[in-house]
Image (cartoon, helix red, strand yellow):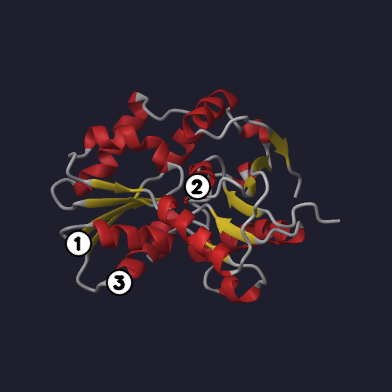
Amino acid sequence: MNTYAGSIGLFDSGIGGLTVVKTLKEILPNEKLIYIGDTANLPFGPKPRQRLQTLSYRLIGYLLGRGVKLIVVACNTSTPAIFPEVMTDFKVPIIGPVKAGAEEAYFRSGQKRIGVIATEGTVRSGIYQKSLLELDPEIKVISQAAPGLVEAVERGEVDSPATIRMLQQYLSVFIGKIDTLILGCTHYPFLKPAIESILSEEVLLIDPAIRLAQQVKELLVQRQALNNGTGNYEFWATDVNKLKSTFLQRASKELGILPLDFKQLDL
Ligand code: DGL
């Protein structure tokens, strides 16, 4: 029996995709959201493409098996490992954050000098660079991989001295060279205040989740698949012991997605 027909499924490696849950809940308050954090396999960033493909397909397969009507890949790193294959292979729409992030940055950047900070996997794939240059081959793109930030966020160290030092090092490549920075990992919006404290206030920070949520809404409207009932949200993790519940509680409160109630999911 599939109990999740009519729901939207989302996944990420951990708590990063909750930043996408937040924007979806704001734009689509009547939808039922099923979120999986694959914490048993966190972090995704350093993993080879083949492994990311296996993990992502497993999560997608599970959500499809539960009958969801649409899947949001709440993870940038998974996106190049599964697109474009997934779009044609499956019966429900599957949408990720990269196209939304690239478009938002392109439309809002005045000087078309755009930075991308993301995991090793995302930067190695070149997916943001490619998406931006498809929009306009004249855009200047600077990409920076940021190993360690995802783990820092998972530990709740969003403004610790060690995290600030890492950020100072990673962001130094952008100083004086960009007017717009894409937060190319769904964990990074948790670091927004720290990033803003390092970069000049003229640099516009782009969280792809905002446009992504609008695109999800458009897809549901087109397919006449909007939910009219009461919205809710469930959070499953493949290893609940890896969730640092104190930070998660604080983060969920800040994101406005309480009550926090996560369950173990054995895939
Ligand atoms: N949140 C994921 C993303 O957007 C990255 C997670 C990870 O490296 O585990 O890329």
Q: CA distance from mark 1 to mark 2?
A: 25 Å
**Quarter assignment of residue 195:** top left
CA separation in Å, label 2 and label 3: 24 Å
Furthest residue in direction left, as rendered: 176
* Mark 2 residue type: Val
Q: Earlier in the sequence, mark 1 or mark 2?
A: 2
- Kindly state the secondary structure of the residue where label 3 is placed: helix
Q: Amino acid at mark 1?
A: Lys
Which residue, given by chain and number where applicable, does mark 3 sit on? 135
Q: Position of residue 210 (x, y in %)?
A: 42, 51
**Mark 2–mark 3 contact, CB under 8 Å?**
no
Q: Secondary structure at mark 2?
A: helix
Residue placed under numbered mark 2 in the picture? 20
- 157 relative position to 197: left or right: right
The tag on residue 245 is none
In this view of the protein, which residue sits in the foreground, 41 or 259?
259
| Above or below, 205 relative to 124 | above
Dot 1, crowdedness within 10 Å: few (<14), some or many (≥20)? some
- Which image quadrant is residue 147 in? top left
The numbered dot on residue 112 is 1
Front-lying residue, 223 or 89? 223
Circles 3 and 1: CB atoms closer than 8 Å: no
At label 3, which amino acid type do we have? Leu
Ligand 1 is within 8 Å of the C-beta of the residue at disc 3: no
Q: Nearer the viewer, residue 235 or 30?
A: 30
Q: CA distance from mark 3 to mark 1?
A: 11 Å
N-term-proximal mark, 3 vs 1: 1
Residue at the location (60% across, 52% down)?
10
